[in-house]
Amino acid sequence: MNNTVLNHPYTPAALRDINDKITAQLADISTADFSEINRLIKERDTLIRAHLSQVHGGAKEAFANHELDVNNKLRDLAQNLRDSTKDEVTRIVRGKAAIKKYK
């Protein structure tokens, strides 16, 4: 996650703080607190919705377009984490089955 940037020129300070916390959590997946990440993502969504209701015109469109890119990055990251976790669980289950065969 260390090369994923969640902030952009239109990111308000409060959202920047949340994005930084998410990035810090994802810096080392082996120690990540996924319940905290989930909480931060929900807080991020609430903040984005509130910010969108406060800005208008070109600034609103620019912010929304940048946030769409960030959201897609987060979605792709979540899908990759899910896939890698699924692969790991599959290997564990197969390993257990192989051990049972040799007992």
Image: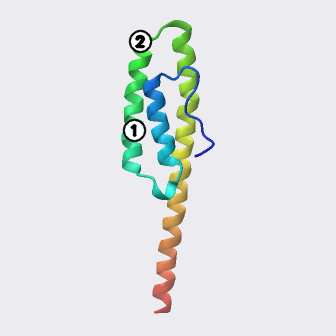
**Where does label 2 land, which residue?**
54
Q: Quick one: label 1, few (<14), some, or many (20+) residues within 10 Å? A: some
> What x and y, as percent, mark residue 34?
41, 50
Q: Residue at x 44, y 34 (%)?
A: 18
Circle 1 sits in a helix, a strand or a loop, which is it? Answer: helix
Q: In terms of image quadrants, where is residue 62?
A: top right
Amino acid under disc 1: Leu
- How many numbered circles does the render carry? 2
> What x and y, as percent, mark residue 77?
55, 45
Q: Quick one: label 2, few (<14), some, or many (20+) residues within 10 Å? A: few
**Label pair 1/2, CB-CB below 8 angstroms:** no
Vertical relation: 41 (above or below) 99: above
Q: In terms of image quadrants, where is residue 68?
A: top right
Display coloring = rainbow
**Residue placed furthest toward the bottom:** 103
**Where does label 1 land, which residue?**
40
* Quarter of the image that includes the C terminus: bottom left
Q: Residue at x 44, y 17 (%)?
A: 52
